[in-house]
Structures are given as C-alpha cells and as structure tokens.
Image: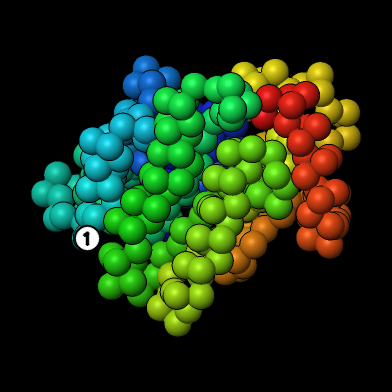
Amino acid sequence: MGTALITGATSGIGLELAWQLAEAHHDLVLVARTRARLDRVAAQISQAAGVGVQVIAADLSVADDVGRVAERLRVAAPAADPAADPARPDAPHTAAQVAAQPIDLLVNNAGFAVGQAFAEGDIAQERRALSVMVGAVMELTHAAVPGMIARGHGAILNVASVTALTAMGTYAAHKAWVRTFTEGLASELRGTGVTATVVNPGLTRSEFHDRAGMDAAWPPIAWLRADDVARAALAAVRRGQVICTPSLRYLGVNALLRVAPRGVVRRIAGHASVRTRY
C-alpha cells in the first residue's frame, strides 16, 4: 500500500490528507512543529485506521530540521524486521517499522499566511515563509525523487494555491514558484514511473485562514472544505494528473486569471491583499 510523508500534517488540508491516506491503508510519516500535537494525531489515526504512523517534529524554516526530514526521505529499502509476526501479516506496523520503509508519496503541504504587507513587514517573517514554502519544498523533493526513480514508482504532491496566478504579495509568489516547479518536475520525471502533482485550492476552511483572520473578508460561497480538497488532490495523484484545481468555481477563477490583463489582476489582487493581509 505504500508509505506517505506529509508536512504540515496536524491541521487543515494536511490533516485531511493524512486521514484519507490512512483510510486507504497507507502507513504515514507525519511532520509538523509541535510534538504533542503530532503524537495525539498519530495515536488517533493509528487506532482508528490500523496503520503505522511515525512522527517527526520539525520546523521547516530551520535548516537542520529540514535536513532531518530529508534524511528520512532518503531511506532506500525496508530493513528486515526480526520481530515481525508471520502469523499476522496484516498487523499494523509500529512506528519503528514505518521508519525503515521508503517513502512512496511525499506531500509538501506545510505553509502559513505571511500576515503582513512586504514594505512595512518584518524581513525575518519573510525569510521564514520563503524557507518553508519554497526552500523546504525544493530540498525535500530533491531528497525523495532519486530513490523513487530507482524503485520505479512514487509521487510528489505539492500544495500551491489559486493565488499563484494573482499578485497577492510574497505568499502568491511562493505558490507561483511551487506551481511552476511542479510542472517542470513532472516533465523531467516523464517515463520514470514517478509523478508530480500540484493542487491549487482556493479559500479552504482551516486553521490557516482562521489565524490570518480571513473569515469575515470573503463570502461563504468562496470557501471549500478541506476534506474535499484532499480527496480531489489524491484522485489527481492516482491519475498522474499534473495540475489539480478543486471545485468548478475555482476552475472558473483560474481560467479568468489566466486570460485577464495583468494590470487588472494587480489592481484587484492588490486591494484583496491589503484588506485581508493574506
């Protein structure tokens, strides 16, 4: 069934992806900053879905932490397990057993609302956002892909945003990089058995937007459910689809953004970014 590693796995789209992959009998490696929350989510998923779950507490704005996750992604083959019970081949794996398994699906989901205008903002916050949403995506993908190619199968799922086609500040710029990076990677991987998919959700009910204070800024019809976004993203991965934009309404938004004059996009998106601070 394979093992999936998910960053930003304890809330929002990342948490929904973890649950849906567990329900499909994938073992999991969950990555997030807070160990207590990771342990709680891992216990809930393991008990409910009967899968093995390893946790890695890591802040992906910190180079050493990114390095630890990258090393996990370089695990090449499962180690022999002398403790395995041949009479119970379907018994859930332990965290130690999961830690020895190669990663078949990498989900780069970690991210956060920058929460400031660039000119008046804290440059340390901008560096952190760039590290998490661009630097870590690049480094973790680079760590995962060679082993997947060697095994002849695997998938990368990167979470971008519909804002990638807007001009809503540095958050949109980071997500535009993720989208373009994934498209280029998908072309490079053609014929290897490894795929790359980028999902571009619109506004999605989660702690991400709650922390950014965006609920009051947009009408109810604009919001998606995290479980629907996760379901669409995983369906796209299974099809080998490169670009996934969940929901018909955001497909329409996506089409409009592609054909609209960039001056119009800048004027509209500029007002939106000032109003919501991402």
- Is 171 drawn above or below residue 117 in the view shown? below
Q: Is residue 170 left or right of residue 167?
A: left
Residue identified by numbered label 1:
76
Q: Residue at x 84, y 57 (%)?
A: 261
Relative vertical location of residue 59 with respect to residue 67 in this rendering, above or below? above
Residue visible at 43% across and 56% down in the picture: 105
Horizontally, residue 6 falls left or right of residue 121, namely left
Farthest residue in the left direction? 82
Q: Say if residue 265 shows up in the picture.
A: yes
Q: Residue 257, percent across and down? A: 80, 54
> Viewed as shown, does residue 89 lie left or right of 24?
left
Rendered location of residue 156, percent (x, y)? 46, 58
Query: Could you tell me if residue 45 is visible in this image?
Result: no
Q: Quadrant of residue 260?
A: bottom right
Foreground residue among 113 and 208: 113
Image position of 46 (left or right of 202): left
Residue 32 lies, with reference to residue 190, above or below; the image says above
Q: Residues within 10 Å of mark 1 (few under 14, many from 20)?
A: some
Q: Residue at x 88, y 34 (%)?
A: 221
